[in-house]
């Protein structure tokens, strides 16, 4: 199966909503994507295409860390969605890997995810890296990744989730 990834295009918006609805079995994630997009928080949005069909989506949005020395920019990786019939075939992994690579190329230094602790470490996310960060979320599901080695050295502060995340 050939998986092609590309940047979100205006004609993809309803398909992205459908992918998120079907992947999660609810509207919450689709509404989150729409709200992040409409409020200007999106930094990267990729779709995965198989045989001409949009089957997956990943979103990276602005997620500042407030420290005593000022704001440190980071990204939230959320959500990652794949149509149920295409799950467990590498679509989500490819979207995440290529998305992280593009974020690095674009000059981003830190990514944060709230996700399954057995899944995201394969991409370099670590709950230990997130320990100095205060968040409304705690535990092994709250993880950070240095897109640039050492980007989190000395960073201690509060992760400020934008208002669209308030529903989670």
Image (spheres, rainbow, N blue to C red):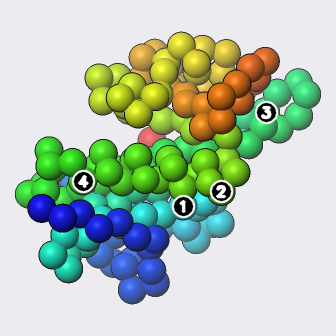
Which label was assigned to residue 44? 1
Residue at the spot of label 4: 91
Which callout, 2 or 3, points at the residue further toward the start of the chain?
3
Q: Is residue 134 left or right of residue 13?
A: right
Residue at the spot of label 2: 106
The image position of residue 26, as x and y in percent, is: 25, 55
The image position of residue 155, as x and y in percent, is: 76, 23
Question: In the image, which is nearer the foreground, mark 1 or mark 3?
Answer: 1
Q: How much space separates mark 1 and mark 3, taking CA atoms?
A: 22 Å
Instruction: Kindly give the residue lying farthest to the bottom in the view shown.
Output: 11
Question: In the image, which is nearer the foreground, mark 3 or mark 4?
Answer: 4
Which label was assigned to residue 80? none
- Who's the residue at 88% across and 24% down the image? 68
Q: Is residue 33 left or right of residue 57?
A: right
Q: Nearer the viewer, residue 86 or 150?
A: 150
Q: Residues within 10 Å of mark 2 (few under 14, many from 20)?
A: few
The image position of residue 64, as x and y in percent, is: 71, 41
Q: To which quarter of the image does residue 151 belong?
A: top right
Q: How much space separates mark 2 and mark 1, taking CA atoms?
A: 10 Å
């Amino acid at each position: 199966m050939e998986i092609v990834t590309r940047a979100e295009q205006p004609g993809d918006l309803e398909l992205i909503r459908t992918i998120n609805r079907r992947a999660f079995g609810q509207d919450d994630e689709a509404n989150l994507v729409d709200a992040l997009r409409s409020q200007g928080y999106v930094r990267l949005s990729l779709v995965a295409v198989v045989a001409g069909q949009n089957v997956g989506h990943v979103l990276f949005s602005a997620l500042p860390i407030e420290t005593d020395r000022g704001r440190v920019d980071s990204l939230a990786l959320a959500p990652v969605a794949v149509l149920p019939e295409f799950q467990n075939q590498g679509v989500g992994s490819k979207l995440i890997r290529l998305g992280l690579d593009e974020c690095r190329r674009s000059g981003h230094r830190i990514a944060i995810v709230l996700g399954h602790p057995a899944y995201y470490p394969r991409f370099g996310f670590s709950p230990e890296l997130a320990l100095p960060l205060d968040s409304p979320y705690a535990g092994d599901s709250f993880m950070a990744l240095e897109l640039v080695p050492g980007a989190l050295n000395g960073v201690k502060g509060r992760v400020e989730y934008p208002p669209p995340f308030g529903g989670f």
